[in-house]
Amino acid sequence: MAGKNVLEIGTATPFKKGYKMDKKTIFFGEVKRFFKFILQEMKPRGKWLTPFNIISLPIMFIGFILLILRFVKGLGYATNLSQEFPWGFWIGFDVITGVAFAGGAYVITFVVYVMKVEKYHPIVKVTVLNGLLAYMFYAGALVLDLGKPWNIFNPIIGNSFGYNSVLFLVAWHFLLYMATEFLEFSPTIAQWLGWEKLQKILKSLTVGAVIFGITLSILHQSGLGALFLMAKSKIHPLWYSEFIPVFFFVSSIFAGLSMVIFEGTISHRVFKDKIDSKHHAAFDEIIFGLAKGAAITMFVYYFFKALVFIHGGQWSYLTDSWGIWYLFEVIGLVLIPCFMFAYGAKNRNLGIIRTAAILTMIGIILNRLNISIITFNWNIPAVYYPSWIEIVITLMIIFTEIWVFRWVVSRMPVFED
Amino acid sequence: MDRRNFLKVTGGIAASLAATGLQAKEKQNDEEFVGVLTDTTRCIGCRACEKACGEAHDLLVPDVENDNALDNLRTPSEKQWTVVNRYETDVGEVFVKQQCMHCWQPACTAACLTNAMLKTKEGPVIWREGKCIGCRYCMASCPFNIPKYEYGSWNPKVQKCNMCYDRLQQGKKPACVEACPTGALMFGSKRELMEIARVRIYNHPEKYVHKIYGEHEVGGTGWLYLSGVPFEQIGFRTDLGTTPYPEYTKEFLYAVPLIFFGAPALLTGLHFLTKKDESSEE
Ligand code: SF4
Ligand code: SF4
C-alpha cells in the first residue's frame, strides 16, 4: 500500500518528492520495526518461578498499593515521621545511602576514561548501568518523601530558585547526573536497537559526559553531607563536623568500589552464560585492583577522621555508649575492612576481599543512618524507627530496580566489549 | 582578591547559584526589622496570646480555662503556632511563650530550595504554600525546631508563626501582642526593643538576668526575651552559638563554583595527558 503511494506521486511529480516519500516509508518501517522489537523484548525470558521472583513479586505488589495509600492519606499514614524527625528511612537509607553506593559509576568511569586504565574496561558498562538505575530509583525515592511533589517544578523550571539551598544544588545535580549517566549508557542501547550510526555519535560524547558526570558526582556526593551542616545542634558531636561534605565524598569512593565488588560477584554467578570466558578470567584481576583502591581511600578517610577527632578534642565523648557506637563504626567497619582489603589484594584472597566489601557496605549504611537518623536528635527523648510500610516500600524500590537491571542485562550487550 | 569578588569574576550558573542568595541576604541586614520583646517576668500565664493566635490564623483555639495544658511542657504544633509553658524555678513559677524566633539570618530560609520560606524585608519569616514542595529541610535545619508539618494530610502545610504578617501590612500589631493583658509582649523595631530591654535591665538589675535572649543567638533573632532566671532553667537552649546558621553551609556553597569549573578543567587535562602517554607507549 505504501509502495503504491510512492509510485503514484512519483509519476505525477519530479523525482525529488518521490524520494522524500520513500524516506518516509523507510522511517515508518523503521518505527514499526522498533515497536515490534520492543514488544518482543518485553516478553519474559527464562523460567518464571524462581525463588527471587516468588519473593519479590508479592512485595512489589503490596508496596505499590501502599504507595498509592501514602499519596491518598498523607505521609503520616505510611511513615513514622514526626515533628522531631522530619527525615526518616526513605531519605536516610534510600536516598542518602543509595546514592553513596552508586558512587562506583563515577569512580570507574574516571579510571577508565580519564586515567585510561584499560584493565577495568570490561566492567564499565555494567557499573554505569547500575549507577543510572540507582539514581533513577534511589535518588528518585526523594519524590515519594515530598509532601507536595506537584510543586517540584518550582525549583526545576525556575519560577522559584532557592540558590542558597544545599538541597537545591543536590536536586539539580541529581537530575543532570541522571542525564549524563544516560548518555554514557546510551551507546549500549543504540547497539541493542541496531542503530549503528547513532551508536557512533553517542560514543563520541562519552568522554565529555564522563567528565561532567564526575564533577557533578563530587558536588552532590559531598552535597548530601552538606545537607546536615545546619543540623549542628541536633547531631551528636562525634558525627557532626564541618567536614561532613568531605567525608561523604571520600567515603562514596569506597562505598562505590565495595558495591562494584559485591554486585560483580553476584552478577558473575547469576549471569554466567552472558559473560564470555575471557572476561571471567579478567574479573579476578579487576577485583584485586578495586580492593587496592578501596584500601587506600579508606585509609585516607580513616586518617582524616582521626585528625578531626583529635583536633576537636573529642576524647570525653568516648566514655558512653555513643562513644562505643562511634568506635564500632570507625574502627570495626572502616579500619578493619581497610586492612582486610589490603591483605586480600596482596595475598590474592578473594574471600577476604568479599567479606571486607560487605563489612564496608554495612559501615557505610551505619554511617549514613547515624548522621541522618540514629544520632539525629540524640539529645532529646524522641526516637524514630521506620514503620513496616516504609520498609516494604523501600524493598519494593530495591526489587523493582533489580528487575529492571535484570531485564536490561539479559537483553542489551552490557557484558560484551 | 576576596572571595566574593572571585565569585563575581567566575560568573556562570554555578557561581550565581551560590552567590545570588548569599548577597541578597547580606543586603537585607541594613533594613530595620521588626520584632517582639517577651518579658517573662511580666507574663502571668493567662494564655490569651494562644487564643488570639488560634483565632487570627484559623487554627486551634484552646479552651484555656479547662484544658490544664500548663501541666505539661508543650511545643508549638501544626495546630498551634504559639504555646505558653510553665517552669518551676528558683524564683517560683515562670511562664514562657514560645513561637518562631524570626531569626535575622534564618536556617529555614537558607534551607528552602524554593524560597517558600521567606525572610521578608520587614522582618517576619513567612511560609508560602504555593511554592513549598514539602521536603521538610526547613524542619531539619531550624535550631529551635519550630516549623511543624501536617503529616496527616495528603496536601500538607508547614505550620509556623508568621508574626501576623498580613496584620502588620494593615498597620496592626501581631494578634498575640494585642491580646496580652500585662504588656509582657511588646511589638517594635528590633533597635527600639533592644533599647527598652536594656533600660529594664539597667533600672532593675536585681530583677533580671543580664542577658537578652535573641540579641546574639544564632546571629540575632527578631523575637527577644527577658528573664529573671538563667535561661537554661526556662527551656532555652544556650548552646546554639552566635553564628548565623546559613554560615555553616556557606563554605560549601563557595566551593561549588570552584569545583564546577575547576574539576572539568583538571579532568580534561588529565584526559589528554593520559592520551599522549598511550600513543608514546605504542
Ligand atoms: S526560629 Fe526556626 S523557623 Fe523561625 S526563623 Fe528561625 S530558623 Fe526559621
Ligand atoms: S518543606 Fe517547604 S518550606 Fe520547608 S524547606 Fe521544603 S520547600 Fe521549603
Image: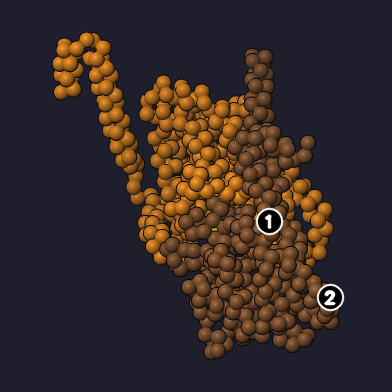
Chain colours: A orange, B brown
Residue at image position (65%, 55%) is A228
Residue A305 appears left or right of A53 = right
In the picture of the structure, the residue carrying the numbered disc 1 is B31
Residue B20 position by quadrant: top right
**Which residue is nearer to you in this view: B36 or A269?**
B36
Picture mark count: 2
**Which residue is nearer to you in this view: A154 or A410?**
A154
Residue B266 higher or lower than A306, as above or below: above
Q: Residues within 10 Å of mark 2 (few under 14, many from 20)?
A: few
**Mark 2: which secondary structure?**
helix
Residue at image position (28%, 33%) is A36
Residue at image position (69%, 43%) is B254
Type of amino acid under label 1:
Glu
Which quarter of the rendered picture does the N terminus of chain B lie within?
top right
Cα distance between the residues tagged 2 and 1:
27 Å
Residue A134 higher or lower than B55, as above or below: above
Residue B21 higher or lower than B198, as above or below: above
Provide residue A406's location: percent of width, then percent of height.
42, 42
Type of amino acid under label 2:
Tyr
**Mark 1: which secondary structure?**
loop
- Tell me, yes or no, whether dots 2 and 1 are on the same chain: yes
In the picture of the structure, the residue carrying the numbered disc 2 is B202
Provide residue B161's location: percent of width, then percent of height.
58, 68
